[in-house]
Image (cartoon, coloured by chain):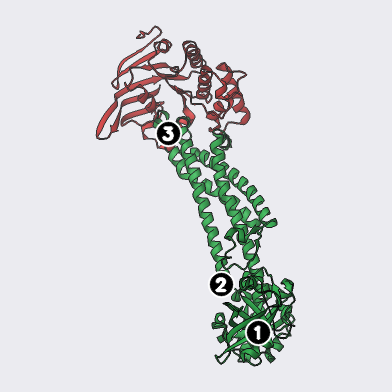
Amino acid sequence: MSLLKLKNVEKVYHQGKIDVPAIRGISLEIEKGEFTTIFGPSGSGKTTLLNIIGCLDKPTDGEIYYEAEKKLSTLTKNELSNFRRYNLGFIFQGHNLIPVLTAFENVEFAIRIIDGISKKERREKVLDILNSVGLEGLEDRRPNELSGGQKQRVAIARALVKNPKLVLADEPTANLDSENSQEVLNIMLKMNKKLGTTFIFSTHDPQVMEYAKRLIEIRDGKVTHDEQGENLDVPH
Amino acid sequence: MFLTKLALRNLTRHKKRTVITSLVISLGIFIFLVSDSLMVGLSDMSLDNNVDLQTAHLQIMEEKYWEKKDEMPLDNLLKEDNKIIKEISNNPQVKAYTPRLYFTATINNGREDYPIKAIGINTEKDVEVIKLDEYILEGEMLQEGKFAIIGKGLAELMDFRVNDYITLLFKTKEGTYNTIDAKLIGLLDTPHPNINKQNVYIPLSLAQNSLNTGDKVSRFLFNLETREQSIPIAEQFNRRFSQNELSLKAYNWEKLSYEMLAMLKQGNIENLVMLFIIIILATAGVINTVILSALERLEEIGMMKALGLRAREIVYIFVIEAAGIGIIGSTIGVILGGVGVYLLKEVGISLSMMTGGETTFGIPIAERIYGGWNPETFFFIFIFGILVSVLASILPARWGAKKDPVKALYHK
């Protein structure tokens, strides 16, 4: 059973009287545990597609199914908020950490808003995930006391702490140097294997694509290439 | 709880902005508290001075005289030796009473005239009701004979000194002109500027003889055990007058001070204006702060929405931040206000300094105004400051929280 199914998804932006299509009838299926990269030139529609998959944006047309039965395109704003709260993790290009909270609190934020997790359980989950991303001992540091790579690791920990089935990452290494990029990607790959979390990236960095187990190319809002396997043909 | 903690931590993001917005609220609260204290002090002192030196607790006069009392007419007068007045004065609540005869006159110093309010007083009884004897600055209290006492303001204006002779020119009951030449035996310095500048006191018998009013007087002034008794006692007296089919009427100090009370009510309106200014200041400050915060934190708002936070939870964060600003501002404002009110209460403020010494705007206070202490106002304004901050933050917070998450995340 696929985790996510997109059926003829379209997205049109209205700029004054002009309609600008960003996604043109994309149909896709994402299986559980995939490590997928969506790539394409700037303006091709990859961020829009990621936002639609992440329920941050609604498609103009088409259907999105989660675990075959849940039709996401019919949910209200509050239902979408709840869906994101329990099922999705996000990693942004800019880590988007809250500067007045420590690394621990930034990660904790994602599960503080989820009911039914005790304080003790919360603490264990946060410390465990921070250890997994290599931030042991840095829990009490605020974002301004962390390096760029460390901040992005906090953001990864925040996305993974609630153990979501799907993590969406929009150009997660764009602000990192090569060494930090590799570290971050290795962590995500490790989590993908360890927790079985499904990852979908958007990127145009060939180094990131090399980590992917599935490559989806988008041009002008359409899927032009979709390939999966161990030795993918990464465009350079 | 976590969102509350986050909201309060957010106050430390831009400390200067938090402090400035809080200080704007503090300033408004400080001004309100000081203004309220002045009004309370002004009101208490004005009423005390007016009752103690002018109206007494209660007055009895003919109903028709009341209608024209400001003109101080010489008709509709009362008999000085009045049976019903004697009877009602046996009431145990009555401490003392005295007759007075009011008339208009001009005072002359040989060079110029000045319009004054002349009052014939019973030299023995009057001091039991209106304690003018406590305010003799120079000379002595009024005695029977062709004597007069006046306020120091009038003495300075007309260049009179103790032992000088003053001349009063007035119309008698029949409308013919008459004069009184009286020796000035005392100067008054009361806290009531009108008494100091306008009043001339002469013995009642001298006034009656000169005005041809016989044994008539304008009013009887009563002092009771307490000021509060004046309302029920006046009602009691009035019932007695009605039963005896008399056209007399008792007026309590509130009715006698209605002009002043109206003026003090005007002061309360000024307080409302101050409240309005606080609302404007606090609202402008808080709206500005919340909008700036929301604009700066658009990506964060987008991230929170992506994490699954609902709009109302984001609104809550901003509202709690505003409440924090309100609490800081109100606390500082109340502390500063407390210091201001303490100083006003202990040191006071010179009325002549405020007005340039030219006028007291009809306020019956001559020198310094001392502030009054009103704990309820402190409590009210503290809560008010917080409430205004919270209410002012709701709309801009909703504006921020309702931002589309995609636009918020990618606004740059």
Front disc: 1 or 3: 1
Tell which of B131 and B21 is nearer to you.
B131
Position in image of residue B40 (x %, y %): 62, 61
In the rendered structure, which amino acid carries the disc numbered 3?
Leu
Front disc: 2 or 3: 2
**Quarter the N terminus of chain A occupies:** top left
In the rendered structure, which amino acid carries the disc numbered 2?
Glu
Numbered label attached to residue B259? 2
The answer to the question of whether label 1 and label 2 lie on touching residues, with beta carbons closer than 8 A, is no
Q: Is residue B276 visible?
A: yes
Tell which of A190 and B228 is nearer to you.
B228
Asked if both marks, 1 and 2, belong to the same chain, the answer given is: yes
- Disc 2 to disc 3, how far (Cα)? 66 Å
The answer to the question of whether label 2 and label 3 lie on touching residues, with beta carbons closer than 8 A, is no
- At x 40%, y 16%, the residue is A36
Quarter where residue B302 is shown = top left
Residue on which disc 3 sits:
A80
- Disc 1 to disc 2, how far (Cα)? 33 Å
SS at circle 2 = helix
In the visual, does A43 lie left or right of B16? left
In the rendered structure, which amino acid carries the disc numbered 1?
Asp
- Chain that the image shows in green: B
- Classify mark 3: residues with Cα within 10 Å, few (<14), some (14-19) or many (20+): many
Numbered label attached to residue A23? none
- Classify mark 1: residues with Cα within 10 Å, few (<14), some (14-19) or many (20+): some
